[in-house]
Amino acid sequence: MSPTLRQQVLRNIPSVDEILSKQEMSDLLKIHPRTVVVEAIRRGLGRLREEILNQNDLSTLDETLFSYQNLLPLFQKEINLQVQPRLRRVINATGIVIHTNLGRAPLHPLALKQIVEVAKAYSNLEYDLARGERGDRYAHVEEILCHLSGAESALVVNNNAAAVLLCLNTLAEEREVIISRGELVEIGGAFRIPDVMKRSGATLKEVGTTNRTHLNDYQRAIGSESALLLKVHTSNFRVMGFTSEVPLDELVELGRKHHLPVMEDLGSGCFIDLVHYGLEKEPTVQEAIRTGVDLITISGDKLLGGPQAGIILGKKKFLDLTKANPLTRALRIDKLTLAALESTLLLYMDEKRAMAEIPALQMLGLNMRKLKGRAKRLLKRLQKKVGNKLQMTIKEDVSQVGGGALPLQKLPTIVLSIKSPGVSLNSLEKKLREIDPPIISRISKEELVFDMRTIFDEEIPLLAGGIEKVLSQ
């Protein structure tokens, strides 16, 4: 392709001032700030220039490419990208219930209502209404956390990694923390327990091997610099076969013998014995507290089903030290998190209600009949709208719990799989991600799959409408 010819074509691209002089632009300038419109024009023209530079055969270019009518939708799209929120609601059709990339656990309607109630006006965040003086923000959830767990005291910070960091810094700064080599997990986003421990100021002392750690491994490691025995629940993986780990109650007994506090990073934050609901065993918070462990840390937005938070539970003397640490101020949660967390915890006063209503737990407990009903409703809508454009099949498949919890749990599910003759699955999947609201699906065995487990009933019309919209483009 001749550089001269390409330059001639590029000269046909109108200037920003030329576009702004169009009478039709006045409508956009009435709606949006001039700076936004100008930036949208610049970006739009930049994309057009890039398209021309990447074109091998310029003879195929349509003459209308440079017309205002053709460019206006491009400018409008660029305006939308600037003014619409970057953080948006999406439809999760992946079947991963606690999807870290998609915001983990959805909140219960009561939690959403309480967030709005607290956010739209003033609140008693740090004001004791009974005494008419300054209060403690953590008091709003400490009592119910202690009631549900059996712990003496509680504290909430902004996430579980922060909870672990705070506890290690409080109890073991410049001293040793003893932990099994098999529990040095990566907790997501490439952050690892040893990294968190290093930032806390504590010194890591590994014992045992990757697959086997015994009580006497801890025993031999205890010395004058030992400050804490740490156990980390391997909630996001399992080591199978020739394995051995020290139960928490035995570690607690060893800690008492040597006057060392024992802490467990329990991770997923399960308050309900899921075995009673047909799921695999996941250690509960109550079971951990009953061992006499001094501190445990859990996440708020995993199996608990609440907002992102790091919850510390345990003995009052250690929680008092932790609360007095200046880092607590830096890691504290805000009023909106407190509102959502308290509302979620109140649902646990009735276990059956929590299991039936908290979205993440409800999804885990869905039966095949319910899932098949959703798939049939979606199929019926699609058959009316785009049936001739799609090959659609209702199938059995497997969902995942996600969020570093129950890694071996297989959740039988129902999916709707689709194919569109002549349309690439990768292209279809990408286009679904780009509409409003974005639809996040998965490709499996040369089909685009929509898992009914993580789709809410009210999202069926949105999902069908999104698929129809993409196919009509």
Image (cartoon, grey):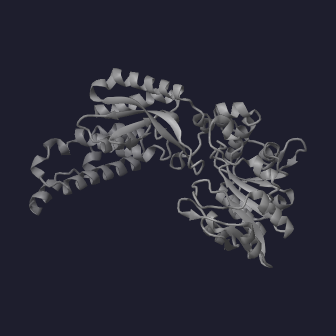
Q: Mark yes or no: residue 90 visible.
A: no
Residue at image location 69% in from the left, 68% down from the top: 179
Q: Position of residue 347 (x, y in %)?
A: 72, 35
Above or below 191: residue 108: above
Above or below 352: residue 161: below
Question: Going by the picture, which residue comes out furthest to the front?
Answer: 242
Residue at image location 57% in from the left, 55% down from the top: 237
State the quadrant of the C terminus.
top left
Q: Nearer the viewer, residue 276 or 199?
A: 276
Q: Position of residue 269 (x, y in %)?
A: 68, 48
Q: Position of residue 205 (x, y in %)?
A: 68, 74
Above or below 408: residue 244: below
Left or right position of 162 against 48: right
Res. 467 image quadrant:
top left
For the image, the number of numbered tags is 0
Residue at image location 65% in from the left, 35% down from the top: 277
Question: Going by the picture, which residue comes out furthest to the bottom?
Answer: 224
Res. 329 image quadrant:
bottom right
Residue at image location 30% in from the left, 30% down from the top: 390
State the quadrant of the N terminus.
bottom left
Q: Nearer the viewer, residue 358 or 279?
A: 279
Q: Nearer the viewer, residue 69 or 434?
A: 434
Q: Position of residue 63 (x, y in %)?
A: 13, 43
Q: Mark yes or no: residue 169 visible.
A: yes
Question: Going by the picture, which residue comes out furthest to the right?
Answer: 131
